[in-house]
Image (spheres, rainbow, N blue to C red):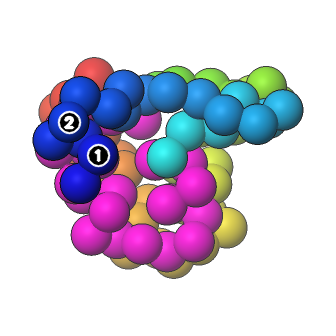
């Protein structure tokens, strides 16, 4: 994984300034969300529209909302 080679876990991309955590949350990739959080991803980062990973998770699955809430609070 790129994180093992020093990739910035909270890096933003595209015009919306989204993070990998936001994108993974939206697409329902629970294991990736957990891995990103375990590597220090911030659940509090806000994109250019004011959305957080939790907001993106609502577009995905309820399980991800629980993961971002519970584990994101511990990491932030």
Q: Secondary structure at mark 2?
A: helix
Q: Is residue 28 left or right of residue 66?
A: right
**Residue 59 or residue 12, whichever sits in front:** 12
**Residue 75 or residue 8, whichever sits in front:** 8
User: Residue beneath label 1, please?
Assistant: 2
In space, the residues marked 2 and 1 are separated at their CA atoms by 5 Å
Residue, x 50% and y 60% (percent of image)? Answer: 25
User: Residue beneath label 2, please?
Assistant: 5
Q: Which mark is residue 74?
A: none
Do the residues under discs 2 and 1 have CB atoms within 8 angstroms? yes
Residue, x 24% and y 41% (percent of image)? Answer: 3
The magenta segment is 21-43
- Residue 7 pos. (x, y %): 33, 32
The answer to whether any part of residue 53 appears in the image is no
Res 37 quadrant in image: top left
Residue, x 55% and y 39% (percent of image)? Answer: 19
């Amino acid at each position: 994984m790129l994180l093992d080679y020093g990739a910035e876990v909270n890096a933003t991309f595209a015009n919306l300034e989204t993070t990998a955590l936001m994108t993974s949350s939206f697409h329902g990739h629970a294991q990736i969300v957990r891995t990103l959080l375990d590597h220090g991803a911030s659940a509090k980062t806000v994109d250019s529209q004011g959305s957080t990973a939790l907001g993106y998770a609502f577009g995905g699955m309820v399980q991800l909302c629980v993961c971002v809430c519970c584990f994101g609070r511990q990491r932030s």
